[in-house]
Image (cartoon, grey):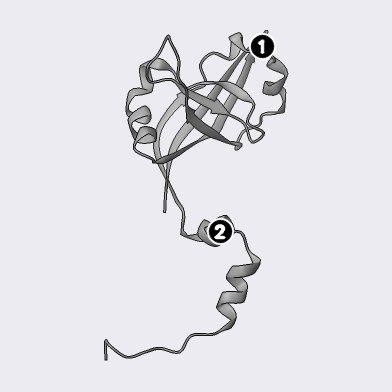
Amino acid sequence: MANELTNYDKNVVSVVGKNDLGDIIKPLMNEIHLFDSYVAGTSHLEDKSVLDNLKIGDMLSLRREDNKFDDNAILILDDKNNKIGYVPQKDNIIFARLLDAGKLLKAKITGIEKKGSFSLISVGIYLVDF
């Protein structure tokens, strides 16, 4: 019978009350791989020491930036909100549109290659879907 009332466990409310919303939603999240790219602009960072703490598998945040050189600029930030670089301009138009539409995008480090003072950081870009 579709219109019956169902008696649920009263302890569910207490479980929800003890956890952050992010902890409750995490099992419902789905990361959809969209694209492989790299972090642009690492050689222009003021503090390059932030690159020393990165490792393969780290998740990075993507955030739009008002930028006079690129209308679609997307910052790449580490877990402490330190600037790592940018999504390359040649790759960023679709991701900028998704972020502008309120979608959550993340990047995951897939490779780190040091060449002298230059660091090539490869990333996968993911849409976080709920």
Front position in the image: 67 or 112? 67
Q: Which residue is mark 1?
A: 46
Pointer 1 with pointer 2, Cβ within 8 A: no
Mark 2 crowdedness (10 Å alpha carbons): few <14, some 14-19, many ≥20: few
Q: Residue at x 45, y 34 (%)?
A: 125
Left/right placement of residue 38 relative to residue 33 reads right
Residue 18, by quadrant, is bottom right
Residue 20, by quadrant, is bottom right
Mark 1 crowdedness (10 Å alpha carbons): few <14, some 14-19, many ≥20: few
- Judged from the image, the secondary structure of the residue bearing numbered disc 1 is loop
Q: Which mark is residue 21?
A: 2
Q: Quadrant of the C terminus?
A: bottom left
Left/right placement of residue 100 relative to residue 66 reads left
Does residue 17 sit above or below 118 in this rendering?
below
Residue 92 at x, y percent in the picture: 38, 23
Q: Which mark is residue 98?
A: none
Q: Quadrant of the N terminus?
A: bottom left
Q: Residue at x 38, y 40 (%)?
A: 102
Mark 1: which amino acid? Glu
Residue 127 at x, y percent in the picture: 41, 41
Of the numbered discs 1 and 2, the one sitting upstream in the chain is 2
Mark 2: which amino acid? Leu
Q: Residue at x 60, y 9 (%)?
A: 43
Left/right placement of residue 95 relative to residue 8 reads left
Front position in the image: 120 or 66? 66
- The span from disc 1 to disc 2 (Cα, nearest Å) is 35 Å
Instruction: Give the foreground label among 1 and 2.
Output: 2
Residue 44 at x, y percent in the picture: 59, 9
Does residue 106 sit above or below 84 in this rendering?
below
